Image: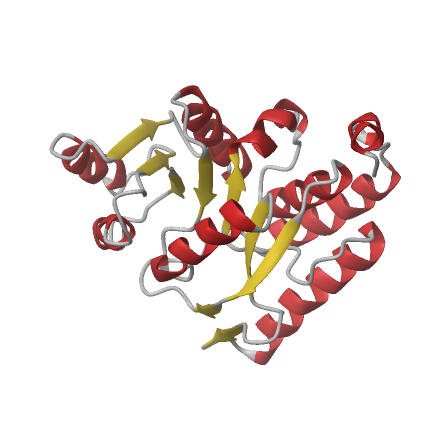
Amino acid sequence: MVVVPTYNEAENITRLIAAVLEQGPQFDVLVVDDGSPDGTGDMVAALAAHNSRVQLLRRSGKLGLGTAYVAGFREGLRQGYQYMCEMDADFSHQPGYLPVLLAVAERAADVALGSRNVPGGRVENWSRLRQLISRGGSWYARTLLGLPIRDVTGGYKCFRASVLQQLDLAAINANGYGFQVEMNYRCHQAGFRIHEIPIVFPDRVAGQSKMSQQIVWEAAALVLRLRVSPNPYKRVRLARGA
């Protein structure tokens, strides 16, 4: 299952769903829409009415990126999916990488992460300032949290279902883009193997970015809180011999 959270993505969502489904019959789509006033949810509902591979989870309002992903993961687990992918709706996460992420999760890792910061990965059409903020944020989180990955804020991933079953999703506190940092950190604490694959990350095709200065500062504060918090998965790692 590919989980796609949306808020006002009417310009992108129909084409995105079609592009995801084109990657193969192994991929279904669950759109988690936070009451988009531009009709995104209604567009997905119309597609879902005629295609069993498309699902819609409507929420009452703009409740945040983190809770949208958690709600999607829980629904996928309830339905028995063995792998759960997450991606944005704006084509910055190019659907063509989905088969690669799934293959890596199946054969070599517990979590496959599309990375902008490993050799072969890059961003396109970003200003130097935006690149500096992104790379600086990853360096800051990686250094303080001792993470072995280079794209700590990356949100294009494929999880084994067993990873999400063992994580305490109710305890994931971040609800903005810091959600990606916290999920990466908790997976690392639990001893799961995270493998980065290079991706090209272009700027969004249409619509407006949800990034704001407040979100950046919230993510920075989250890293500090995570740094001083105890490891809730220490016993799990000891049981694995880690």
Q: Is residue 100 left or right of residue 238?
A: left
Instruction: Depth check: give the residue in front, 224 or 95.
Output: 95
Would you say 110 lies left or right of 148 here?
left
Q: How is the image coloured?
A: secondary structure
**How far across and down, in percent of the image, does residue 133 sit?**
65, 67
The reply to whether residue 28 is visible in this rendering is: yes
Q: For the point 74% across and 36% down, which residue is it?
A: 190
Residue at the image point whose x is 83% and y is 39% from the top: 242
151 vs 235: above or below: below
Q: Position of residue 212 (x, y in %)?
A: 56, 55
Place residue 125 in its image quadrant: bottom left
> In the figure, residue 44 lies in which quadrant?
top left
Residue name at image x 48 percent, y 30 percent: 73
Give the residue furthest to the top.
78
Please name whichever residue, 214 or 1, is drawn nearer the observer in this view of the structure: 1
Question: Where residue 217 sits: x, y (%)?
Answer: 69, 52
Image quadrant occupied by the N terminus: top left
Q: Residue furthest left?
A: 50
In the rendered view, does 7 fall on the left or right side of 183? left
Q: How many marks?
A: 0
Q: Is residue 210 visible?
A: no
Rendered location of residue 87, percent (x, y): 44, 49
Q: Considering only vertical position in the picture, is 30 above or below 122?
A: above
Task: Depth check: give the residue in front, 175 or 29.
Answer: 29
